[in-house]
Amino acid sequence: MFHLLSVALLAKSITADKALIIGDSWAEYSLQTLQEHCEQVTSMVNRGIAGTTAAQWAGKVHCGATPDSLCCQHDGRTCSLDNVSFEETYRISWLSIGGNDFFEAGCSSDSTAVNQIQSNVEQVIVQLQSASPNTKIVLTGYSVPKGPLTWHPSAACSEFRALEPLNQLVKRAAEARNVAFVNVSHLMGGSRTQWSNAEFFRDSIHLNAAGYQHLWGHPSLQTAMECTIEHSVSSAPHRTSLGALLFAFGLALNGSERNSP
């Protein structure tokens, strides 16, 4: 009986490939697309809330204190990891934050503003690491928009290079906390001298379904998210192959036969 129970627990661990998404509109609008384009993700939780900032997540904004915040207008949820259940282990987490802080600062590259945003991003990473220490965390920053951000009053936000300081601070935050960073700034076809391809966007800055498919299909991001069988088997010893499960099951059967009267 003990052996069979061990095999049952082993089988459960093989399928426990759960992903967690946290952050702003890039996170929320991704819906369940990560699971659709990552074969090793069998279930996921998306806690993205459009319009929210790294400062709000870092400060654990709760609805009781700030009922008018975006954190509370979205199904009554809060910008806090306290609102995320960690009873189950998340193997992978994608964290998308910092963009709205940067826009609120007028897309400024001023070191004081940038350093504050980086500090808040790092704080959220630390909170996630503390809540779920076995979860691999991945940050990506943001892609070059498909066109000028005309909805923002600051002209600095409508330059080709506008998001460079943002992506750099997200990268520094990831490196400072020893988590993965994948640069997707030019993935949608944009560069320092041209906008991204419109086919990947629902508006000037938010990705559409094709954009998320292109995002998750990026080889570097596939690797970082451990999406392929080859990568997950070779780099994640805590996960067990089907062959190993069958071998363990055989041992359990043999053991139960030896121990039976």
Image (tube, rainbow, N blue to C red):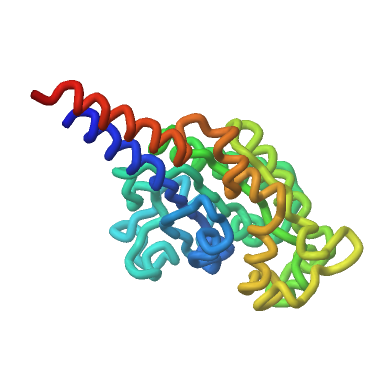
Q: Position of residue 166 (x, y in %)?
A: 71, 51
Please say if 8 is above or below 165: above
| Residue furthest right as drawn | 193
Total marks drawn?
A: 0
Figure quadrant of the N terminus = top left
Give the residue at x 34% y 41%.
11
Give the residue at x 71% y 72%.
200
Q: Position of residue 252 (x, y in %)?
A: 27, 30
Please say if 245 is above or below 74: above
Of 73 and 33, nearer the camera is: 33
Specify whether 144 is left or right of 84: right
The reply to whether residue 49 is in sight is yes
Quarter occupied by residue 66: bottom left
Please say if 194 is above or below 105: below
Q: Position of residue 29 (x, y in %)?
A: 54, 68
Figure quadrant of the C terminus = top left
Give the residue at x 66% y 34%.
175
The reply to whether residue 50 is in sight is no
Of 92 and 246, nearer the camera is: 246
Give the residue at x 88% y 58%.
192
Of 205 and 245, nearer the camera is: 245
Of 138 and 41, nearer the camera is: 41
Specify whether 156 is left or right of 232: right
